[in-house]
Amino acid sequence: MASTTETKQKKMLILKSADNDEFEIEESVGVQSETIKNLVEDGFTFVPLPNVYTKALIKIIDYLKKHANKTDSNDEEIKTFDKDFVNTTFDDLFELVSAANYLHISCLMNMLCQTIADRIKDKSPEAVRKIFHINCDYTPEEEAKIRKANAQAFEGQFDESLD
Amino acid sequence: MFRNGGSNNFRVHSFHKRFDRHSSKYFQRPELGAAEEMEGKSDIDVTADDRISKLPEPILQHILSFLHAKDAARMSILSRVWVSAWNSLSYLNFGDKFVSESKDIPKLLNAVDQALANRKKSKISIQKFSLKLPHHRWLSYVDSWITTLIACNTKELNLTVDRPIYQVIRKYNSLPHAIFAVKELQVLSLGGFKIDLPAGDGMIKLSSLRELHLSDVSLDEQFIQALCSSCCNLEDLSLRSIVRLTSFQVGETLPKLKKVNLEFCPYRFQLVDIAAINLEDLKIHSLYRNIEVVKITACKALKSLHLNGVDVTKNWLEKLFYSLQNLETLHLANCNNLRTTKITSDSLKWLTISCYNNLIVADFDTPNLLKFQCSCDPLSTFKLKASVLLEVTLHLYAEHGVFDWHSKLVKFLANFNYAKAIELMCDGYKEIVIPKDLRENFLPPLYGTNILQVNLEKQSSYSVVHIIDSMLWISPRPDTLSFTLPPGLKSLKFIYKDASDEDGKPCCASLPWKCWRHTLKQVKLQNFTHLEEEKLIKYFFANADNLEMVETSVLQIVHS
């Protein structure tokens, strides 16, 4: 597989997803990921990614391609792309955030975490529980203790809505 | 399921209609597909999995790092996973979302105290600590926090304390000197302090410092000197509303310095001398001083320069471009004494000028210019050499009582005839509607332009037809005309007959080739109201000889 990189002028890489799909991308696109960059620096052109599934990888390659072509004039275009990119279900966001974390793509990581954080911001714990289906695993005594230890955090009015 | 380019926040309905010249029938095909394909965003489902709590703790903490500490702490009540993530969170943002009532402040101080003490006890390094204290009364807490922050190897510290008022005068808070000895500190932002060098050796030992942002601070030249001699890793220096400082000298001791901001410094500067060889980005704002004291021509790597409220002169600019061969971006604003200017540069790609009424003569020999933005009166003497890919944005403000304003505008616009795209920003409609009698005396100024956009800030009594009629005179054979009028963008796309069909008869607009009136085949209208559509359809069929079809579509974006 590694030999295919010689066929084009631009240096190419092959990424292999956890479900064994292979994707060919330009090296300059791939090295925005620290993980891939380190492998490339060690001479690899075939990069197995056992923690990244195909559907997340397709989206991430899209993202990397878009951001590799950043110029002075396509700022707005990239902003729109990013906005669409994070406009997806939580399941997708969690899948992507795990992949971005494994691949060490810090700008993508920040964007995804910011998107998730925005859904927690100003909310009451009850609302956050419902939004993310979080079950409480405390005994009533433990819960009271935590509430007391962080008393200031529970003062005031919070957003109870689920959007 | 992953989708590309889908939008869940919006519901998009798109309706198309076609109007034929010979029949009043039209097809209507609502395209709801896009909306129906979309999945509901995280509909509440009790059986669903708690996936967020299964994320590895570092990712969960990365998410919490974007929250105010109060929000992050509150989430500790969710479950054991979350309390653990909070207790070892290394980002503490007690930022500006602050209790306004002073009776609540002691509770907050207590919360900060506790959060820091817990981290010190558990030996957790602090990546980032941010705090804005609304009153100096609690400054004594800050001293002890800084001691803890040093113990926790803090990398980034943002600290603002409101300035005390004594007898109507706002004083500055004194800054704990311990802060100058935090070797691990990489980013430091301070507001509301008087900064003096530590007694004794007077040294700053911030050897890892990459970014320093000081705002609303009192300091002098000695501090800048100390900074230059010890912070050799400094990349970004920003000074805003600084008092006492009267000269700013940065030499070659800061080889990594890439970005400098100098804004709103009210003292009379004797000298601004920057000779940082790798500086790429410089912004000087509101320095109403003789420009001759500003010496920056040694910054050979400079790519982007913003000057706002600085008395730039023609000579100073000429010398600047002679010395700085890498300058790609120049923004000039409120440079009130600049009456004539000449810029010669092969590197310049983006030029913004907003000097309102003072600039009269401009000559730009900039063959690689891609973006030109200007807000000033139409210049009577103007020369521009730019790239064929040039995009132009002009802000137009018609003055009352200037009777030949429109003829000046038409002459000025002609300079941009071959630009790739032109955007005109206007206060109202009167700027963009060129009087009929004038149209007979001039050649359409933008006959070579394909894309014309007009952005209007206000509603007006002019009808859409008036505006489009004028836009089509200004640019008589465009591919796209569009205008924004809050809340949205309305656009028209044009398809013309093949050029080979042209019959060689002269065009009505005395152009070398035929204008839209003779060649227009098809028009697509987007986002107009029904009334506007009706008027425009009538207008186009009445004025375009060969028009075959008008197609309309409305894209309603409804926030769900």
Image (cartoon, rainbow, N blue to C red):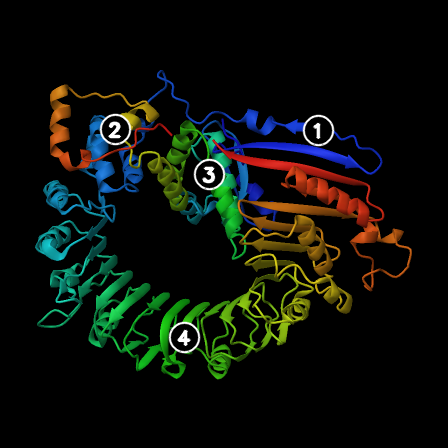
Query: Is B506 positioned to the left or the right of A136 in the image?
Result: right
Q: Earlier in the sequence, mark 3 or mark 2?
A: 3
SS type, badge 2 = helix
Real-space Cα separation, disc 4 to disc 3, in angstroms: 53 Å
> Do marks 4 and 3 share a subunit?
no
Q: Cα distance, mark 4 to mark 1?
A: 58 Å
Q: Badge 4 local density, few (<14 within 10 Å), some, or many (20+)?
A: many
Task: Please tell me which residue is depicted at 12% across the width and 25% down the height of the picture.
Answer: A144
Q: Is residue B54 above or below residue B344?
A: above
Pinpoint the chain carrying mark 1.
B
Q: Secondary structure at mark 4?
A: strand
Question: Where is residue B26 shown, x and y percent of the image?
Answer: 76, 31
Pointer 4 residue: B310
Q: Amino acid at mark 3?
A: Val
Q: Quadrant of residue B474?
A: bottom right
> What residue did someone put label 3 on?
A47
How far apart, in angstroms, are the residues tagged by discs 4 and 2?
51 Å
Q: CA distance from mark 3 to mark 2?
A: 41 Å
Which residue appears at 47% of the width and 78% of the height? B320
- What percent of the width, then of the height, locates residue B170? 18, 65
Q: Which residue is mark 1?
A: B28
- The tag earlier along the polypeptide, 4 or 1, is 1
- Within the image, what quadrant is residue B406 found in? bottom right
Q: Visible in this render: residue B276?
A: no
Q: Label 3 marks which chain's residue? A: A
Residue B523 position in % (x across, y down): 74, 44
- For the residues beneath circles 3 and 2, the answer to whether they share a chain is yes
Would residue A63 appear left or right of B220 to someone viewing this image?
Answer: right
Name the image quarter holding residue B421.
Answer: bottom right
Q: CA distance from mark 1 to mark 2?
A: 48 Å
